[in-house]
Image (cartoon, helix red, strand yellow):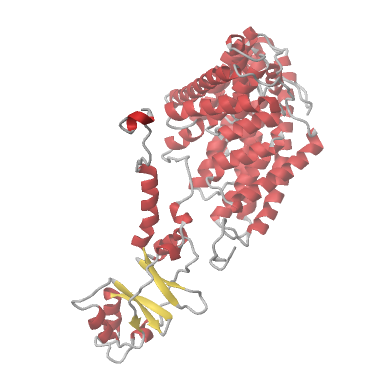
Amino acid sequence: MSTEHLDPNKRDFSANARLPGICALAAVIGVLGTVAAIVLLKLIYLFTNVFFFGTFSLANHSPADNKLGFWVVLIPALGGLIVGLIARFGSDKIRGHGIPEAIEAILFGKSRMSPKVAILKPLSSGIVIGSGGPFGAEGPIIMTGGALGSLLAQCVKVTAAERKTLLVAGAAAGMTAVFGTPVAAVLLAVELLLFEWRPRSFLPVALACAVAGFMRAQWFGVGPLFPLETAPPGTISLISCLILGVASGALASGLSVSLYATEDLFAKLPVHWMWWPAIGGLAIGLGGLIEPRVLGVGYDVIGDLLHGQLAVKVAVAILVVKAIIWVIALGSGTSGGVLAPLLMLGAGLGIVMGPILPGHEAALWPLVAMSATLGATLGAPLTAIVFAFGLTHDANALLPLLTATLVAHGFTTVVMRRSIMTEKIARRGYHIYREYGVDPLERHHVDEVMTREVLTIDAELPLLEALTTFFGPNQAHRAYPVVRGERIVGITDRASLASLTDAHGGSGADMTIGDALAAHPVTVALPGETCRLVAARLAVHGLERMPVVADRESMKLIGIVSRSDLVNPSRTHFEEEQKRERFRRISWRPAKHRNGA
């Protein structure tokens, strides 16, 4: 097969000579993110022991084992008060569950985060969770890892896009270090944080997660966090997956609506927001008094739910109490993550619905509902599916996970305008459109849309003669390229040519147009460049059209591209999306009737 017609400048992916350097920085950030995750977990252990057991210890103890009695109500309030003070006099950026703040920094803050966030976020989260806050460590570590990535990027000379990549690398590395799920962390970056699918961003983030995964193994081992093995699903299990997917989607939608309704109620309180976490802490304490298992991160409780070690009545209590205190606590603006609470709530839903679902063993449904609830709430179904598999290594559950999670995601995309992640950002005046695809201007190159037959002006023509000849009554085009031989000198229109004529005494009889344009560098396009790149160049330089040259050395003119030319790919894309066509008509009549027999 001949390859003569192939243009070496056209590639599947854009070339990027800076990619190796960015990958090297991402590897360093993977190390930093892992260290930050370990520090955060140790802080949670420390503050849990201080608040509930009165000891300075880094041992992992569950707050549910406390012997404080009614005094447990005051512990989360105390933690909330401390964090409220930190937010008021330190940085209010530590408020919230981390991922929306990271998204906002990426899209609207050029991925710049402050050193205060890198220090105060893990500290405040350790205090909140250690004092019984019903949160996970993943949201804070996503924010902390992102801050570390951003800070390192601010110390070197990089673009805003490269800084975004390094911020996301830190966030994903932190999540990998906490849960040991590097593939799910990469998917979270793709579905929630990067807002693009390009090797320039995907590869550094994946490398940071790989580094974090290898480093995590040195502290926590290589096994899954919640090892599980269920039996292969039967055909009847499809019905259960559909039912559970709808129920999980409804739970996710209800949690999101309740959260922001609670946030609105806190905003109406006649006290400063500094006091809100303490008020929310009282609700946490009351919930912990009713059902102690809802306090703290609760990884042990999630494991018990997944392995069916808790009765249905206990699961109902956990589901109801955890949902209420989590919504109140997060609505109060305190610091904590959403992944671990959603895992617990989803698993609780699976336990509750298990006895009434047809088909398969009951052990499957907590895992399936956990994934479906997480995917529907985050608006990241692929992340949730791979995350659930990474936590359990249960390959038999993959098909039910896929079915239920996608049903739940479809449910929420129909009934909800925004996810729990983007609602907070929208309330600050920024709308985020989550769908994205290949830009039609990326799919087409300049040589596909440019005008090849170009009328030019000879560079040796005097200014006045050029003005009267090409911009007189019979003017054919708004602008013309100016060439000396085949080499482009510049491009001119009536206004610019008149201005050049006036600048040279008004007559321009002794000045050629080529000499007049010599002081004005010409901006050109290459035939192998994408239409998107050229459109951006036109916008940056405020141009309506641009000459196309064979290469920058010869500057040989081969065409011209204008803004109107760049509209054509978008027109084709619009027709593909909107124009309905039928090429064949299906008839159900027998052949003899169609033939008139």
Q: Is residue 222 left or right of residue 501?
A: right
Q: Is residue 44 above or below residue 437?
A: above
Q: Residue at x 57, y 51 (%)?
A: 198
Most extreme residue toward the bottom is 510
Who is closer to the viewer here, 460 or 8? 8
Most extreme residue toward the top is 313
- Location of residue 157 in the rendering, given as x and y in whole percent from the top left corner: 60, 60
Q: Residue at x 36, y 36 (%)?
A: 585
Q: Is residue 275 left or right of residue 291?
A: left
Where does the C terminus fall, quadrant-wise?
A: top left
Q: Is residue 40 left or right of residue 218?
A: left
- Location of residue 553 in the rendering, given as x and y in whole percent from the top left corner: 52, 78
Q: Is residue 374 above or below residue 247?
A: below
- Location of residue 46 in the rendering, given as x and y in whole percent from the top left corner: 74, 28
Q: Is residue 33 above or below residue 338?
A: below
Residue 92 in sight: no
Q: Residue at x 64, y 33 (%)?
A: 386
Residue 396: image quadrant is: top right
Q: Is residue 210 left or right of residue 430?
A: right
Residue 319 in sight: yes
Q: Is residue 463 above or below residue 184?
A: below
Where does the N terminus fall, quadrant-wise?
A: bottom right
Give the total number of marks visible in the rendering: 0
Most extreme residue toward the front is 597
Who is closer to the viewer here, 449 or 586? 586
- Location of residue 447 in the rendering, given as x and y in whole percent from the top left corner: 44, 65
Most extreme residue toward the left is 473
Residue 498: image quadrant is: bottom left
Residue 270: image quadrant is: top left
